[in-house]
Amino acid sequence: MLKLPENFIFGGATAAYQAEGAVDKDGKGRVAWDTFLEENYWYSAEPASDFYNRYPVDLKLAEEFGVNGIRISIAWSRIFPKGHGKVNKKGVEFYHNVIDEAHKRGVEPFITLHHFDTPEALHKNGDFLNRQNIEYFVEYAKFCFEEYGDKVNYWTTFNEIGPIGDGQYLAGKFPPGIKYDFSKVFQSHHNMMLAHAKTVKLFKQNNYPGEIGVVHALQTKYPYDKENPADVRAAELEDIIQNKFILDATYNGSYSQRTMDGVNHIFEANGGSLDLRDEDMKILNEAKDLNDFLGINHYMSDWMRAYDGETEIFHNSTGDEGTSAYRIKGVGEKVFDVDVPRTDWDWMIYPQGLYDQLIRVKEEYPNYKKIYITENGLGYKDEIKDGKVDDQPRIDYIKDYLTAVHKAIQDGVNVQGYFVWSLMDVFSWSNGYNKRYGLFYVDFDTQERTPKKSAYWYKELAESKEIK
Ligand code: BG6
């Protein structure tokens, strides 16, 4: 019998922009995504899952189904419509209400300050490539610590610094939609890590109550042919882009020689440079031991083969399996034709990858303190039939990944909780509404919620703590 620890969090994750809707209600400022979706996609974030109005319903469901933690993010532009300056009282009040309701339901709120949704006014000025925006972020964080500090135990600065830089400047699937610009990718990673470090320092210096950490997306990279040194190098370089650069910044407070060799190699092949200043390194170094926890979002593993042709990335946004392409000059290409199941969106399902990643954090970054799996779940084209949703593949997915987490705990990794992505169906940034992840099915026309088969399974899991 596999049993998870007594005080383990069995959570559900959401994000403001993907759940709330109400994108222009009650004084909320625009975010870059509003415009980007209008110009590039066939869907919008309105009304999403209408969490803005229905949070009491979702939190009640969470309580009923044993979900004892919820990740929510604060929409920066609900608090500061222009990113800084004038405060929007109605936005401030909304998050008081949500947090209070969560506590009333016995659901611990884990609050993220930034989940992909920089206010448009700051985004137009370069987003985190503009160092001034680092200061605005710290001011916004300070405001939140002072406003909500007495009722929040867990703060996260950023959700997924890696995929933000990659989505914005490599794949071009996030605003501003720039492709293959490695200067911007690494500068964004670095500047956001600086913003994180400054915020964590402030949090500790001012003795705000609670804990603070950051959420990184860590997908595990394997060589396609582990006997071939060129494939091994391809996996290492891809790991540097997505994982190691930001992990080094978080826990070493510096970039290792090996990391910088990889970054320079990528710049040589693709062009690019990085502005790293002495004072930056001092700040990263001062914050490296202050993180109370690391959140890990993990969905897949990738197999990499050496590649020297032109860079080409194609994002499968439709769920037509086999339509993805990811090849970076001088780095490598993802091979999808390996003997591992994958989702309709070409995400390779490999629970061992989560185990390996957890062991990697423990061994390479021994000052990590503790970990929450802050996102993991299966994107699936759920269908509702006779008022029921049979999502057995999602149950299997969660069960297998939790089994990997259990094994990592046995092997000495300090993991304290798991948040399924997502609590209820929400909208997916570059995929729209048919890539569903929720425990609760959302009819996006009526906003009615229906617990899926996985919700009943999760309830049993949360009650017994046994993975069955
Ligand atoms: C993570 C994000 O990258 O993965 C979520 O934190 C996101 O916001 C989730 O929705 C799943 O990704 P996608 O692209 O399938 O929605």
Image (cartoon, rainbow, N blue to C red):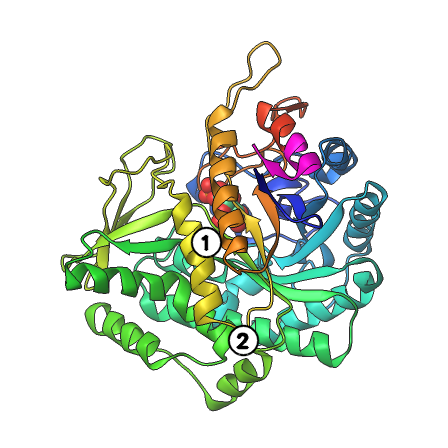
Up/down of 206 relative to 374, above or below: below
Can residue 164 be seen? no
Q: Position of residue 439 (x, y in %)?
A: 60, 31
Q: Residue at 70% across / 51% down in the picture?
A: 28
In the figure, is residue 451 to the left or right of 336?
A: right
Q: In this view, does 209 lie to the left or right of 82?
A: right
Taking the spot 34% from the left edge, 36% from the top edge, the residue there is 342
Magenta residues, start to end: 459-468
- At a point 49% along the width and 62% down the height, the residue shown is 161
Q: Position of residue 324 (x, y in %)?
A: 29, 41
Q: Is residue 255 left or right of residue 127?
A: left
| Predominant SS along the magenta part | helix
- Amino acid on which disc 2 is placed: Leu
Q: Where is residue 43 in the image (x, y as percent from the top left)?
A: 50, 34
User: Which residue in the structure is indicated by mark 2?
Assistant: 194
Secondary structure category for the residue under label 1: loop
**In terms of image quadrants, where is residue 455?**
top right
Q: In this view, does 428 lie to the left or right of 202?
A: left
Q: How crowded is mark 1: few (under 14 residues within 10 Å), some or many (20 or more)?
A: many
Name the amino acid, label 1: Pro
Q: Mark 1 points at which residue?
A: 175
